[in-house]
Image (cartoon, rainbow, N blue to C red):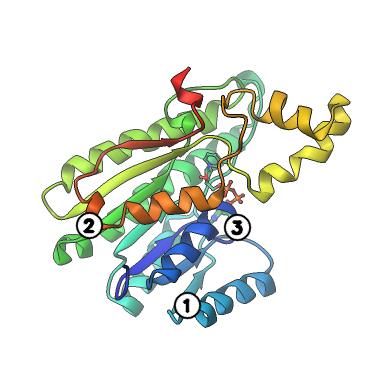
């Protein structure tokens, strides 16, 4: 489906981004990975994608808080592959704190990574997409692009911001064969979530099931985590011709969370 296309996925060294990158490679796309982590592990992932799927896979260590590094990553991808045809803005971090105690540097980092980095990648990718008359921009937003939770002011502000950016760019490029959409997952089972469970069990004197149902999935009516593969399937669908009329949307994969 994506043969001869190139996909760049920010924050793709783990979790949702990695699942999306693997799905795109499986469907024939050359892939640019990005994110932090152990250099040997990342190289194993990169080489594994090339070997398993017979595509080219590159890795950029660009820090999504740094506009200069983002510009270099985008320029390198364009130089090597001709264009970034599918851009997935996925890198994200979280910090939980009451607003009056929220560390200023955490606010700045979350806004930079979860929101502003998408502006920098989009502005770099759009000219070639316009030239080719085809492009897909997919932003990993969150249920928190649509509703709020207490103590997550920066994350919710950034994710609501990405909703605005998604809709605005969608309107600007609507007649250029480019679609721009946001995927809005609820709680997704990633290493990040899994790692919180033992500590929360200890801190609250709860069983694993209680932590999952009453803490993590308190807002998610199905009481089931979304899987990274379900998010990746949606990201693949959005690249298909069948999805060419879907643009400017917030697509919820949240087990009913935002139906409340
Ligand atoms: P994760 O921690 O597994 O992945 C985050 C990725 O972002 C990693 O590859 C990490 O290295 C990268 N990253 C972090 N800071 C970076 C920086 N400064 N520069 C470049 N890369 C950086 O988390 P995940 O759960 O897979 O989250 C991915 C996206 O999905 C995020 O935008 C997150 O907000 C969103 N999301 C996650 C959930 C969930 O429940 N896990 C729910 C809704 C939305």
Q: Which residue is mark 1?
A: 53
Along the line of sight, the residue nearer the viewer: 167 or 211: 211
Decide: few, some or many residues near mark 2? Use Cα within 10 Å; few <14, some 14-19, many ≥20: few
Q: Residue at x 53, y 33 (%)?
A: 155
Q: Residue at x 77, y 27 (%)?
A: 210
Sequence-first disc among 1 and 2: 1
Label 1 to label 2, Cα distance in Å?
A: 22 Å
Percent coordinates x, y for residue 251 in the rendering: 37, 37
| Quarter that holds the N terminus | bottom left
Q: Which residue is mark 2?
A: 241
Q: Which residue is mark 3?
A: 14
Q: Secondary structure at mark 3?
A: loop
The residue at label 3 has a CB less than 8 Å from ligand 1 = yes
Left or right: 207, with 260 as reference point: right
Label 3 to label 2, Cα distance in Å?
A: 28 Å
Sequence-first disc among 3 and 2: 3
Q: Marks 3 and 2: CB-CB under 8 Å?
A: no
Label 1 to label 3, Cα distance in Å?
A: 18 Å
Front label number (3 vs 2): 2
Percent coordinates x, y for residue 229 in the rendering: 52, 53
Sequence-first disc among 1 and 3: 3
């Amino acid at each position: 489906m994506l043969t001869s296309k190139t996909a760049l996925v920010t924050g793709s060294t783990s979790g949702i981004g990695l699942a999306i990158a693997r799905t795109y490679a499986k469907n024939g796309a050359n892939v640019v990975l990005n994110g932090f982590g152990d250099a040997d592990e990342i190289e194993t992932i990169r080489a594994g994608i090339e070997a398993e799927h017979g595509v080219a896979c590159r890795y950029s260590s660009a820090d999504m808080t740094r506009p200069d590094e983002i510009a270099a990553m985008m320029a390198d991808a364009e130089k090597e592959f001709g264009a970034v045809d599918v851009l997935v803005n996925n890198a994200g971090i979280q910090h939980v704190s009451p607003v009056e105690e929220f560390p200023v540097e955490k606010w700045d980092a979350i806004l930079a990574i979860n929101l502003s980095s998408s502006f920098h990648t989009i502005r770099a990718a759009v000219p070639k997409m316009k030239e080719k008359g085809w492009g897909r921009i997919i932003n990993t937003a969150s249920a928190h692009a649509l509703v709020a939770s207490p103590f997550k002011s920066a994350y919710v502000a950034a994710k609501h911001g990405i909703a605005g950016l998604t809709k605005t760019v969608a309107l600007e490029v609507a007649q250029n064969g480019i679609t721009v959409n946001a995927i809005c997952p609820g709680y997704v089972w990633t290493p990040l979530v899994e790692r919180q469970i033992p500590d929360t069990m200890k801190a609250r004197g709860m069983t694993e099931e209680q932590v999952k149902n009453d803490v993590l999935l308190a807002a998610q009516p199905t009481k089931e985590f979304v899987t990274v593969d379900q998010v990746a399937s949606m990201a693949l669908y959005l690249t298909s011709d069948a999805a060419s009329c879907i643009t400017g949307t917030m697509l919820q994969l949240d087990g009913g969370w935002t139906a409340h």
